């Protein structure tokens, strides 16, 4: 039968790369089944080498030892390297490697590991591949092969109505910008690691580096991550991704991992099952905030979030800055359902401070409202309405939202103060004036005070925010 790169379905598939077919101009691969047969040629190639990284050349490695043995399409791992960083090009004469993404760990010479997985369809040897369609094929990876490596550049690859069964290491891998405008529609990806604990899985269904990727109406079952996504303009709509296991009080990890702080991305109408939406800046060569856009541009709406048998510190939404000084400058989490089954969780969101915390004095344009909570101990909202009753007359009333502001934010703004019934003074005479408000009170800056010209008592509802809107 013909090679997989020429579009003919074949049994007993052995690994080949697109460099073997330099003349191919593909448009469509459709119908049938591809079956990977085990053999030594599918084993990943692993090379460990010393290399030098300089932040002044953020996508280049220099003085790479043993460079002739490092293949284009190898995944790079080591200290200071983010997830899914790939070898985009190799220049043996110059001793340099072009990276798909910068390192966050700063300049220096370090030992790195280069792992080259083997794929049923591998286009890494082509310079560019545009408008390639894969439709209605069952890819039986059988824990032997990975599925698809995209060309270094290209636009609008479309994978639709396909099943990818038990990929060994990766589903779809982008080593450059060949994922620009990629579409994945009505597909099913089944992991080879379903029986493992969540923390023991290593396979990743999809990674992307470019913009405008659409993943719609697809299903991803028990991968380490469903998708690691750089770029902006992504639409993640109507999918179901599972990442649970059979452990009691199990840990959970990023299902959708967003690796750019300002993402302009919509996550809408998905079933997000035992996994985290993790938002990082792990591809920034200088991960500290330096007057660039910080975390923003993300809409999470109309989704169903579920957890089963998880530890109470599990969170469905996690922001993880890799450097200091960052803040959230545009986030909308609304109209979602959060439900914990067989064990409550403390809250739905967190800041992962492994590397740094957020700057709470600069939070801006955050909406978290209209969500439904079941099995969640702490309700969170922004804006948040606080009901306060002052039983003893006082000139200063202190109101605290407790832990109900998202991400542990400060009480930075008050939208309204509404009295519930009559406010009276110490002799029960009516107090008709309005108080003035002071925000960011207390050692943790999470309280506000209402200040009256005379001692007063009564009940008020105060709508406050942990951000500013301008």
Image (spheres, rainbow, N blue to C red):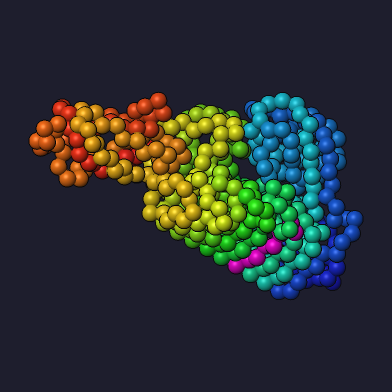
Q: Residue at x 83, y 32 (%)?
A: 65
Q: Is residue 293 visible?
A: no
Judging depth in this view, the residue of 8 and 446 nearest the camera is 446
Q: Is residue 250 visible?
A: yes
| Horizontal and vertical percent position of residue 119 | 78, 57
Position of residue 135 in the picture relative to residue 240 (left or right): right
Residue 191 is covered by the magenta coloring:
yes
| Horizontal and vertical percent position of residue 450 | 24, 32
Please tell me in which quadrant of the rendered image residue 240 appears: bottom right
What predominant SS class does the magenta segment belong to? loop
Position of residue 396 in the picture relative to residue 209 (left or right): left
Residue 291 is covered by the magenta coloring:
no
Judging depth in this view, the residue of 207 and 269 nearest the camera is 269
Judging depth in this view, the residue of 28 and 297 nearest the camera is 297
Instruction: Name the image quarter holding the C terminus.
Output: top left
Magenta residues, as a range?
186-193
| Horizontal and vertical percent position of residue 294 | 48, 36
Q: Hey, which residue is sitting farthest right in the picture?
A: 40
Q: Residue at x 81, y 70 (%)?
A: 10
How many numbered dots are placed on residues in this image? 0
Please tell me in which quadrant of the rendered image residue 280 appears: top right
Instruction: Name the image quarter holding the N terminus.
Output: bottom right
Q: Residue at x 26, y 32 (%)?
A: 397
Residue 111 in the image: above or below residue 28: above
Residue 238 in the image: above or below residue 348: below
Q: Hey, which residue is sitting farthest bottom in the picture?
A: 32
Q: Residue at x 64, y 50 (%)?
A: 250
| Horizontal and vertical percent position of residue 269 | 49, 61
């Amino acid at each position: 039968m013909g090679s997989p790169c020429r579009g003919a379905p074949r049994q007993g598939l052995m690994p080949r790369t697109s460099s073997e077919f330099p003349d191919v101009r593909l448009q469509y691969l459709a119908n049938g089944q591809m079956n990977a047969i085990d053999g030594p040629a599918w084993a990943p190639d692993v090379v460990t080498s010393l290399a030098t990284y300089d932040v002044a050349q953020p996508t280049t490695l220099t003085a790479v030892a043993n460079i002739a043995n490092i293949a284009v399409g190898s995944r790079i791992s080591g200290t200071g390297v983010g997830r899914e960083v790939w070898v985009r090009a190799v220049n043996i004469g110059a001793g340099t490697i072009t990276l798909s993404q910068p390192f966050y760990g700063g300049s220096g010479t370090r030992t790195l590991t280069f792992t080259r997985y083997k794929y049923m369809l591998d286009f890494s040897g082509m310079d560019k591949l545009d408008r390639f369609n894969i439709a209605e094929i069952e890819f039986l990876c059988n824990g032997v092969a990975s599925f698809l490596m995209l060309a270094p550049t290209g636009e609008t690859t479309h994978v639709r109505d396909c099943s990818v069964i038990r990929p060994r290491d990766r589903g779809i891998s982008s080593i450059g910008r060949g994922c620009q405008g990629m579409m994945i529609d009505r597909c099913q990806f089944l992991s080879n690691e379903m029986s493992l604990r969540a923390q023991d899985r290593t396979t990743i269904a999809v990674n992307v580096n470019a913009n405008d990727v659409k993943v719609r109406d697809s299903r991803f079952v028990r991968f380490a991550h469903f998708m690691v996504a750089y770029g902006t303009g992504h639409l993640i709509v109507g999918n179901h991704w599972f990442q649970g296991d059979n452990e009691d009080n199990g840990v959970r990890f990023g299902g959708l991992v967003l690796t750019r702080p300002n993402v302009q991305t919509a996550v809408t109408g998905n079933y997000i099952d035992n996994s985290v939406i993790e938002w990082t800046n792990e591809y920034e060569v200088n991960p500290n905030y330096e007057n660039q856009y910080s975390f923003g541009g993300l809409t999470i709406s109309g989704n169903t979030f579920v957890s089963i048998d998880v530890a109470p510190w599990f969170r469905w939404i996690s922001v993880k800055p890799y450097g200091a000084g960052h803040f959230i400058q545009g986030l909308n989490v609304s109209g979602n359902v959060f439900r914990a089954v067989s064990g409550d969780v403390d809250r739905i969101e967190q800041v992962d401070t492994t590397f740094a915390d957020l700057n709470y004095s600069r939070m801006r344009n955050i909406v978290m409202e209209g969500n439904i909570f079941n099995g969640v101990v702490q309700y969170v909202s922004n804006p948040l309405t606080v009901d306060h009753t002052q039983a003893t007359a006082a000139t200063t009333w202190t109101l605290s939202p407790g832990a109900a502001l998202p991400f542990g934010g400060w009480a930075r703004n008050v939208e309204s103060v509404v009295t519930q019934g009559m406010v009276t003074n110490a002799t029960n005479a009516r107090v008709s004036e309005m108080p003035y408000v002071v925000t960011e009170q207390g050692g943790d800056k999470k309280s506000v005070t209402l200040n009256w010209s005379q001692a007063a008592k009564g009940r008020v509802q105060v709508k406050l925010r942990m951000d500013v809107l301008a």
